[in-house]
Amino acid sequence: MKVSEEGRERMRQAQLNGNNWMRGRTKENHPNWKNGVHRNKHCGKDYEEWRTAVFERDNYTCQKCGKVGGRLNAHHIKEWAEYHELRYELDNGITLCETPCHKEIHYTPI
């Protein structure tokens, strides 16, 4: 969609004047607020703390191939969806490099 220079200027002025319909609509006031529940399991303080603890325990090292650093994933040994009580248990996590180790676990052909 092309916007004319005049249209762009009107949008720019609206932003500069602070005419934003979402201003002040955060958390409970936001139309999509779901009581702090995130659709993405990787959002939230509990997950971030668990992930960091798994990485630190494993010294930021893939436990399958021994690669240090790089793109690492904190993998749930017992599935996230089925074992709610184990979601943030340190013993239910393992550090894996993204490629190939973590991908092999999730994308192994049948």
Image (cartoon, grey):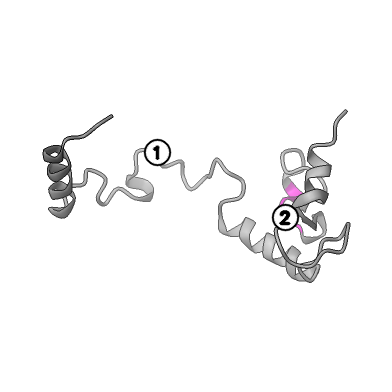
* In this rendering, position of residue 46 left or right of residue 92: left
- Mark 1 against mark 2, which lies toward the viewer? 2
Q: Quadrant of residue 33?
A: top left
Q: Quadrant of the C terminus?
A: top right
Residue under the point 69% across and 60% down? 51
Q: Is residue 23 left or right of residue 42?
A: left
Q: Is mark 1 in CB contact (under 8 Å) with mark 2?
A: no
What kind of secondary structure does the magenta stretch mostly adopt?
A: loop
Q: Is residue 87 magenta?
A: yes
User: What residue is pinned by disc 1?
Assistant: 32
Residue 43 in the figure: left or right of residue 70: left
Whole-percent x, y for residue 91 in the image = 82, 59
Disc number placed over residue 89 in the picture, else none: none
Q: Residue 4's x, y, as percent?
A: 16, 35
The residue identified by callout 2 is 73
Near mark 1 (Cα within 10 A), the count class, few <14, some 14-19 or many ≥20, is few
Q: Position of residue 58 (x, y in %)?
A: 81, 67
* Residue at image point 48% right, 48% down: 36
Quarter of the rendering occupied by the N terminus: top left
| Residue type pointed to by label 2 | Asn
* Circle 1: element type: loop
Spot occupied by residue 76 in the image (x, y as percentages of width and height): 77, 50
Mark 1: amino acid: Asn
Q: Earlier in the sequence, mark 1 or mark 2?
A: 1
First to last magenta residue range: 85-89
Question: In the rendered structure, does residue 44 fall within the stretch colored magenta?
Answer: no
- Give the CA distance from mark 1 to mark 2: 29 Å
Residue at screen point 81% across, 54% down:
92
Q: Residue drawn 83% across and 43% down?
A: 104
Badge 2 marks a residue whose secondary structure is strand
Q: Could you classify mark 2 by the number of other residues whose Cα lies within 10 Å: few (under 14), some (14-19), or many (20 or more)?
A: many
